[in-house]
Amino acid sequence: MRQEQTEPLSEQIMGGFNYPIPAREQTEPVPERPGFIIKGITNNGFLFHPIDWAEQLHSRFITFGSWGEEHYFPYVAMSFIQDIVSLVVEPDLWEVNPEGYEFLSSFAKQNDLAIVERELIPPPVLRIEN
């Protein structure tokens, strides 16, 4: 029989980092950090090994629900871009997990992986006409 977790999500271990979600006041400025894409090729054009590197990094950002189900962190996603395994990091990751953001950034730099910075794009606005 499983025991239900009573801790709030912000107190659980997320992505290998135990951290509380930072609480800030509305007037406090949010540091702007760009989103970026880590491509599975080095800056010299070689494929990065191990081939499952993106899966291993992505799995650090999984949380587990009260019944043991996996919840993927919405700010880190695996993708294939131009047939290359890539990891897409959203800029919002910096707000909720600055250690995770810095870890992914330094991992890419230490392994000489190609990094593509993403522009901060606002979500599309849906217009419903009557």
Image (cartoon, rainbow, N blue to C red):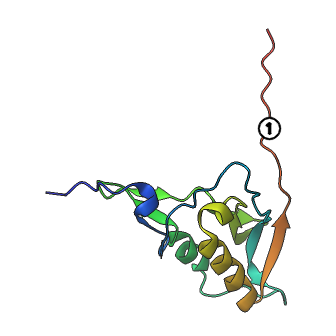
In the rendered image, the quadrant that contains the C terminus is top right
Q: Position of residue 77 (x, y in %)?
A: 63, 62
- Front position in the image: 24 or 109: 24
Above or below for 128 versus 21: above
Front residue (pair 84, 1)? 1
Which residue is pictured at 75% across the width and 75% down the height? 39
Q: Would you identify the image quadrant in which residue 104 lies?
A: bottom right
Residue 123 sits above or below residue 115 on the image: above
In this rendered view, identify the residue nearer to me: 11 or 53.
Answer: 11
Judge the density around disc 1: few (<14), some (14-19), many (≥20) Cα neighbours within 10 Å.
few
Q: Quadrant of the N terminus?
A: bottom left
Which amino acid is tagged 1? Pro
Farthest residue in the left direction?
Answer: 1
SS at mark 1 in the image:
loop
Picture residue at 60% right of the left edge, 62% below the top: 96
**Direction from residue 42 to residue 65 in the image, left or right:** left
Percent from the top left, x then y, of residue 61? 52, 67
**Residue 121: image location, x then y, percent:** 83, 50
Task: Name the image quarter holding residue 103.
Answer: bottom right
Residue at 42 percent of width and 62 percent of height? 11
Residue 87 percent across, percent down from the top left: 67, 69
| Above or below: residue 32 compared with residue 126 | below
Query: How many numbered discs sit on the rendered protein?
Result: 1
Whether residue 67 appears in this view of the structure is yes
Horizontally, residue 123 falls left or right of residue 69, namely right
The residue labelled by disc 1 is: 124
Q: Is residue 78 visible?
A: no
